[in-house]
Amino acid sequence: MSQDVTRRKIEHVTVALGHDLTAPQAASWADIRLIHQALPEVDLDDIDTGTDFLGKWLRAPIFISSLTGGHADVATINARLARAAEHFGLAMGVGSQRAALVAPELAGTYAVVREQAPNALLIANIGAPQLIPQARKAPFTSADAQRAIEMIQADALAIHLNYLQEAAQPEGDRKAKGALAALGRIAAEVRVPVIAKETGAGMSREQALKLRDAGVSAIDVGGAGGSSMAAMEAVRAEQRGDAQTRAIGEVFRDWGIPTPISVIEAGEAHLPLIATGGVRSGLDAARAIALGATLVGVGFPMLKAASEGDDAVDAFISGFLNELRVAMQLTGAATLAALRRVPLIVGGATRAWLELRGYDDHLRALARRG
């Protein structure tokens, strides 16, 4: 099994870099309109993008999303991303550590992040489907979760909720009953905060409330609109000649709750939120934070830049932060706390969804802030 998991890791990176995996359903950031301030009374150079997340101060609200590890060829990518996290003062996650838990010789492909980022906020990562028995596979335990944490000296543990991906994966783990209770046990027993992390299908308020009650400390909404994990697995299934599984990936490529909606719905849990899913610019980041996110997660653009080199990663992050600062100035927000108080208008399909879900008063309050 360890060889299968390792092969899958490098295939994921290869497919992500070599195919268009964009979900047909846009992340809908254009539905979120920040109100321009013609006289903002905020100097651009005085903008402060610092924020606290789970007790650690970050210089910017960017989470380098949980991307990879588990194969020797991707260790360089993790090293480059970790150096950037250290340099810019960001949070960073690693990809699923399942590979190293079943094949300890692969631990170095994850541990490199702490070597390169001794002071950054690092987030370990295991999967919710692997917390319950699957076909011919014993579940991971709290001790396994703690091993994942110690592998990278992590400050937090993400438990990813990727049932859409598992359904579209040729070798996917399809059992789900009991995963919420298992997640709760892990949250109670490990020695760091636990983050529940969706991986591209979004988060509803009902699920966010259940996760809060299970003991998670934060939620990464992982909304629809960025790269589609179903589309990725459809490519892998096609490469194996698995037509039925490929069809699942294609049919469900557009499945999920867009990220802006997920931020508002998951906000009902009153936990720190990471807005991941289709965040492609600093303006998108500003919109997400104004909606209530604590951090924004960026995945594929980081992976692409890291495949090119350190300079490409630094250039992407620098440009992203410049865009965020400009958006903050143009809304009159000198800090992220102030950005969360600026008025905004929600329109389009996003507004239609939220009205049907009973958020009319919330939408009016957003428009009247400030």
Image (cartoon, rainbow, N blue to C red):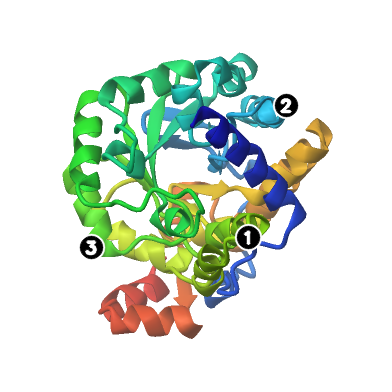
The circle on residue 43 is none
Foreground residue, 180 or 267?
180
The circle on residue 241 is 1
Report how far apart the C-alphas of labels 3 and 1 lie in the structure.
38 Å
Circle 1 residues within 10 Å: few <14, some 14–19, many ≥20: few
Q: Amino acid at mark 1?
A: Gly
Q: Is residue 130 left or right of residue 23?
A: left
Instruction: Identify the residue at horizontal 32%, vertical 35% (top origin).
Output: 194
Residue 251 in sight from this viewpoint = yes
Q: Earlier in the sequence, mark 3 or mark 1?
A: 3
- With respect to residue 23, does 183 lie above or below? above
Instruction: Identify the residue at horizontal 60%, vertical 57% (top origin).
Output: 232
Q: Nearer the viewer, mark 1 or mark 2?
A: 1
Image quadrant in which you'd find residue 4: top right
The circle on residue 206 is 3
- With respect to residue 104, does 282 lie above or below? below
Report how far apart the C-alphas of labels 1 and 2 lie in the structure.
31 Å
Foreground residue, 212 or 241?
241
